[in-house]
Amino acid sequence: MTQHVVITGASAGIGRATAQLFGKRGANVTLLARGAAGLRGAADDVEAGGGKALAVPTDVADYTAVASAADEAEAAFGPIDVWVNVAFTSVFAPFSEITAEEFKRVTEVSYLGYVHGTMAALAKMRPRDRGTVVQVGSALSQRSIPLQSAYCGAKHAINGFTESVRCELLHEGSRVRITVVQMPAVNTPQFSWVLSRLPRHPQPVPPIYQPEVAARGVVYAADHPGRKQYWVGDSTAVTLIGQKFVAPLLDRYLGRTGYDSQQTDERVNGQQPNNLWEPVDEQPGSDHGAHGGFDGKSYAHSPELWASQHPVASSTGALTAGLGTLLAARAALRRTR
């Protein structure tokens, strides 16, 4: 039976790579995003891989639009089997330099967009008592960093509401599943179109992983949704374990290093296009694809993804990583004094 998958934020980055991977499996893929050029490119990718695609221009901040897209998806391909929430936007700036309107917009897209997608998905799945929702999270959902207060706040909120929904589904005895995939820094186009007030070009905090690594984690979670959470990337494991054991130390360490690590050496004038309010891949020829501008610095494989899929085998490694985090953070903090 052909699988039907809905992906928000499908025009670029992790969403785009995930759409490509499901397309190669021959799935029917409904693609939701704002940018017309990116959506067309994603649809072409799915069909080139052997799947069928439906592109629905959608701003996930608008629940009515998301619910309508879900109706359109089922009219085209039948019942939705998997719904993947990926869409987000952000502002790279100190909190004091973000306006209330900008913070609200990030929250509406990056948090409420997930709420809206989950609502629309469950409205279809719960009456049938089957289906899976995959939330694409981040290591920053449990360990925040400077300059991304709006994004980190949204990612923390996703964890909270997802846990509540999971408990409710368990209470009902529902066979609908919901899971989260926590991501590392990923080489996506967001760093070329994010609203930034930094003096230098924004970058993901190394180590950086290719979007295909993230996509493999999403597809695995969709196939094995019984676990509460999956981790992709060694840095995700180190970050989350470090937050558990040495959070105050990480506060001081990130306060001293977090600004520089999120910027390249390239100076910018602050006038570059951004996608906070409008898509930047609206016009023909402006499709950005899955990858950002850091291919030469990005990893194509993640040992931690395997470990996350084999938790018993990786338990000793997790303890070792936790100890390593403590020692590395202490040493790094001493070097920055």
Image (cartoon, helix red, strand yellow):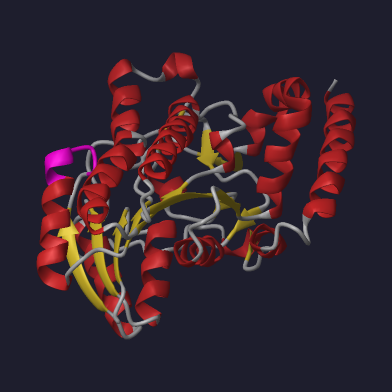
Q: At 85% across and 34% down in the image, what residue appears?
A: 326
Residue 273 image offset from top left, x and y in percent: 32, 42
Q: Is residue 108 left or right of residue 310?
A: left
Magenta-highlighted residues: 60-65
Q: Is residue 63 located in the magenta-colored stretch of the structure?
A: yes
Which residue is more in the foreground, 141 or 261? 141
Number of numbered discs present?
0
Quadrant including the N terminus = bottom left
Q: Is residue 166 left or right of residue 3?
A: right
Vertical arrangement, residue 238 with respect to residue 28, above or below: above
Vertical arrangement, residue 104 with respect to residue 138, above or below: above
Residue 51 image offset from top left, x and y in percent: 29, 81
Vertical arrangement, residue 150 with respect to residue 56, above or below: above
Q: Is residue 203 located in the magenta-colored stretch of the structure?
A: no
Quadrant including the C terminus = top right
Q: At 53% across and 43% down in the image, what residue appears?
A: 138
Residue 213 image offset from top left, x and y in percent: 56, 64
Q: At 65% across and 67% down in the image, what residue appears?
A: 301
Which residue is more in the foreground, 171 or 260? 171
Residue 269 image offset from top left, x and y in percent: 43, 34
Vertical arrangement, residue 70 with respect to residue 138, above or below: below
Q: At 36% across and 40% down in the image, what residue appears?
A: 89
Which residue is more in the foreground, 45 or 113? 113
Q: Is residue 312 left or right of residue 54?
A: right
Q: Is residue 261 visible?
A: yes
